[in-house]
Image (cartoon, rainbow, N blue to C red):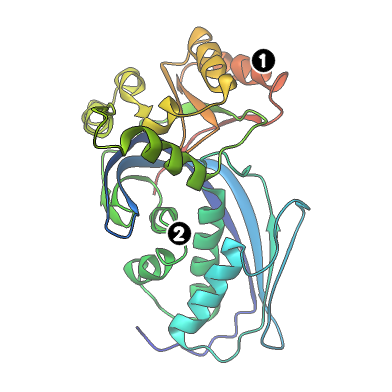
Amino acid sequence: MKGVLFSMRKNISINAYAKLNLSLDIVGIREDNYHLLRTVMQSISIYDTLKINRCVGDKITLSSDDDTLILNEENSAYKAAKTFLEAVGIADRGISIYLEKRIPSQAGLGGASADAAAVLIGLNWLYGAGLSTSELCDIGVEIGADVPFCIVGGTQLCEGIGEIITPVTKLADCYIVVAKPAGGISTPKAYAEFDRIYGDPDVNAKTQEYTDDVMLALTTNSLSQVGSAIGNVFEQLAEVDEVASIKEVMLSMGAVGASMSGSGTAVYGLFNIAEYESAMKCMEYLRSQYPFSVICRPINK
């Protein structure tokens, strides 16, 4: 890696953008029990904001406006700071991070990964380290499988455990309604449930795969075709009744497609760019039942 350059930069404010899975297939399991994925991910305009400061001392400190967060070495933002500083050999290690949370947890929206990615990007700038995107991704995958995507952003095919990233045709501009039920699903629990159902070689159970159809639909620049193709293997496993109910509402109110994101439980619906009023009505209706209901748009780099 490149040596750290002298930098007078002391602070940065950086947005950490959430992601959606337009598709999510599990295609195998490695010997170390990590699951192999094929997924098309999309950055969206829901974001956390991180304010990162260099300060005197050698401690990494976290604070947040969300009192439900664990603000210690288990937090992804802390892990990202510690891993970055060790990777580039920085002695001046005093860092304070303030995290304004907007992305809900246990939603499948990649909030923790987005925060970690933002810390890596922010520290790279603050210290003038000059690491390439690829080098940041190499650090990021040590923290979490979705971190490399959150560093790159846009519309990407992610394979392996998420670290093999290939650009695909961008999602057409649209409105996206996102709603999250009160219940959440932890990622380890979701994978354990997948293994329970599909990991038994004596059970001839196969999952539907969505990724190839989504990539083909993206090339048409037709949101309706993308909406017809989106899907997520974890949706078959979710034990949250509201997931199906939210999808039904979205589709009945004009969405061209709806799916759960990640391991859940947030659900999103795609609305054509000319259907702002329909998207707003859908969001407002859902918000009366699910407090985290928002409208956003794709972010493409």
Question: Can you say whether 127 is above or below 245 in the image?
Answer: below
Q: Which residue is drawn at 41% across and 70% down?
A: 139
For the N terminus, the quadrant is bottom left
Picture quadrant of residue 218: top left
**Front-lying residue, 296 or 287:** 287
Q: Residue at x 21, y 29 (%)?
A: 216
Q: Distance between the residues labelled 1 and 2?
A: 35 Å
The residue at which mark 1 appears reads as 285
Instruction: From the viewer's perspective, tell me whether residue 32 is left or right of residue 86.
Output: left
The kind of residue tagged 2 is: Gly
Residue 239 image offset from top left, x and y in percent: 53, 26
Q: Which residue is drawn at 33% across and 40% down?
A: 40
Q: Which of marks 1 and 2 is nearer the N terminus?
A: 2
In the orientation shown, which residue stands out farthest toward the top?
252
The kind of residue tagged 1 is: Tyr
Residue 259 image offset from top left, x and y in percent: 44, 25
Q: Residue at x 27, y 26 (%)?
A: 208
Instruction: From the viewer's perspective, tell me whether residue 180 is left or right of residue 138.
Output: right
Residue 257 image offset from top left, x and y in percent: 41, 19
Picture quadrant of residue 194: top left
Give neighbour class at mark 1: few <14, some 14-19, many 20+ (Cα, 10 Å): some
What numbered label is drawn on residue 272?
none
Picture quadrant of residue 273: top left
SS type, badge 2: loop
What numbered label is drawn on residue 144?
2
Nearest-to-viewer mark from 1 and 2: 2
**Front-lying residue, 129 or 269:** 269
Residue 285 image offset from top left, x and y in percent: 67, 15
Give neighbour class at mark 2: few <14, some 14-19, many 20+ (Cα, 10 Å): many
